[in-house]
Image: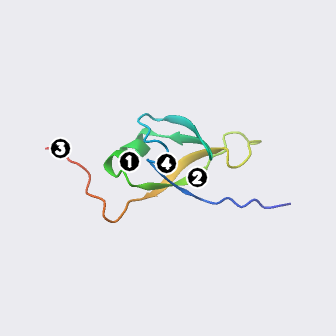
């Protein structure tokens, strides 16, 4: 049995076209599901880079077709999130 290696990649808001609504989007690397929480992070930290994680919704689905966002890195020089008083 061959073992398939999955490489984790990082994705930024710019790379996904600065989408503004949660949903499932087709990109060159496959389908990506973006949640409202993911968008909230990008609104506070526009340069944040999320780890792409493979998601299998069906047992017979090939790896690499469906993705969701995992942990994220915020650039060290990112400004603090906006607050309202």
Tag 1 residue: 42
Q: Earlier in the sequence, mark 1 or mark 3?
A: 1
x and y percentages locating residue 48 in the rendered image: 40, 55
Q: Is residue 61 left or right of residue 22?
A: right
Residue neighbourhood size for the residue with mark 3, other residues' Cα within 10 Å, grouped as few (<14), some (14–19), many (≥20): few
Find the distance from the CA under tag 2 to the CA under tag 1.
17 Å
Find the distance from the CA under tag 1 to the CA under tag 4.
12 Å
Residue neighbourhood size for the residue with mark 1, other residues' Cα within 10 Å, grouped as few (<14), some (14–19), many (≥20): many
Tag 4 residue: 15
Residue at the extreme bottom: 76
- Viewer-side label of 4, 3: 4
Task: Please tell me which residue lies in front, 61 or 45.
Answer: 45
**Location of the C terminus (image quadrant):** top left
- Viewer-side label of 1, 4: 4
Tag 3 residue: 84
Residues tagged 3 and 2 counted as in contact (Cβ below 8 A):
no
């Amino acid at each position: 049995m061959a073992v398939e290696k999955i490489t984790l990649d990082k994705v930024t808001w710019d790379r996904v076209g600065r989408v503004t609504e949660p949903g499932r989007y087709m990109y060159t690397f496959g389908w990506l599901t973006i949640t409202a929480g993911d968008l909230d992070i990008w609104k506070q930290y526009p340069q944040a880079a999320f780890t792409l994680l493979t998601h299998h919704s069906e047992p017979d689905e090939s790896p690499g077709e469906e993705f969701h966002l995992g942990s994220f890195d915020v650039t060290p020089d990112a400004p603090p999130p906006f607050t309202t008083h």
